[in-house]
Amino acid sequence: MNALKVRTRYEHTIYACYIGFITQAIINNFAPLLFLIFQSSYGLTLDRITLITTTNFLVQLLVDLISTKLVDKIGYRVSAVCAHFFSGIGLLGMAFLPDLTGNAYTGLIVSAVLYAIGGGLNEVIMSPIVEACPTEKKEAAMSLLHSFYCWGHVGVVLLSTAFFALFGISNWKILACIWAIVPFANLVYFTQVPLYPIVDGDKGLSVKALFSKRIFWFFMLLMVCAGASEQAMSQWSSAFAESGLKVSKATGDLAGPCTFAVLMGTARAVYGKYSDHLPLKKVMIISSVLCIVSYSLAALTGNAVLAFIGCALCGFSVGIFWPGTFSIAVKRLPTGGTAMYALMALAGDFGCSAGPTLVGFVASANDGRLSAGLSAAMIFPVLMLAGLMTLKKARNTG
């Protein structure tokens, strides 16, 4: 790779952000593939396993909040390097800390905290870095960027499933070390690529100014619902397929989270290609309706085939939620700056925590029936639809 091109061409900045979203996919989706392994190997209950995911997203939420001030002070390059360092250390921690701490659950929680710090920083900085690049069709660029989270998710599921088939699930700790290579390699990449000004510090809106704008609160609601709608299904789809639909782990992983991620990535890539012809708000409203239908199929039919279809359609339906909300917000609040990105990421991560947590605790209260948990989580796409309809009728910027 030509070193001069890496340092001067914005394409490499975008490539590094793509890998950043792949890193995000690894830290969010590798552990859920091991939920039942954690349950059998470490004797963990469903609600304790749920708290691993909850910890991940709550720490990301805290980092999002801190980032409203921190990122502008230390700079985007330092933030990117730190994000990938903590992501890599957290993945390594999964392999070693359960034994080193003498308490497997404590080791897993500490690991989740470490990689969540990286995830929180990644989530705040990747979108504005790409938004600042001198590209045309900003909405398309944003949608394509977020599609790499999906392709990373697919890669995690497929490659992990292949690894388990070849070397056995008992060697999952080795795989955790292999996945850690991705953030460490991208850490080096981010030290070289060019970065462009986001919004000058004296022009970006303050947190107080953002909070005073009514439309900003609609964006926060949409981000909560986007994260919850996506992760409530994604985080539990493998375990749901295995325990509720009585299929093998490999089948559960492939038919659940893998298909979910493929269709979510497809939705984002398709919108990225045809964004000029697809009104964003209308697409998001239609997607909300489809998401409600998807949850109904997965949770209420009791039929394995229809449930699989529901999981898959859910991936397609939620694809545009997260990048679409960012794109609308940037248009309506162009001087939002780092504070806006950080607070919206915070809202999204709150949703990412709330969705899977609600599923887990409702399932535990109903004899472990994940279908009951998914039924409860249907409230999030319903609220997403209501928020979008309200936003569509709004005639001012807050």
Image: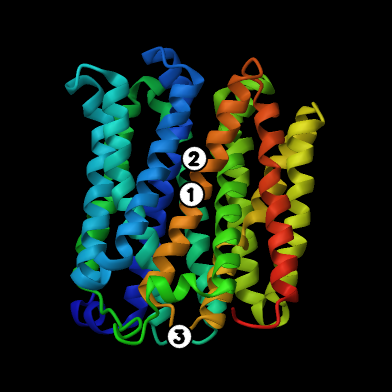
**Residue neighbourhood size for the residue with mark 3, other residues' Cα within 10 Å, grouped as few (<14), some (14–19), many (≥20):** few
Q: How is the image coloured?
A: rainbow
- Foreground mark, 1 or 3, reads 1
Q: Earlier in the sequence, mark 1 or mark 3?
A: 3
**Residue at 77% across, 53% down:** 290
The tag on residue 157 is 2
Q: Earlier in the sequence, mark 1 or mark 2?
A: 2
What is the x, y in percent for residue 351? 53, 49
Secondary element under disc 3, as helix, strand or loop, is loop
Secondary element under disc 2, as helix, strand or loop, is helix
In depth, the one of 250 and 321 nearer the eye is 321
Q: Which residue is mark 3?
A: 135
Secondary element under disc 1, as helix, strand or loop, is helix
Number of callouts in the render?
3
**Residue at 72% across, 77% down:** 279
**In which quarter of the view is residue 188 placed?**
bottom left
Q: Earlier in the sequence, mark 3 or mark 2?
A: 3
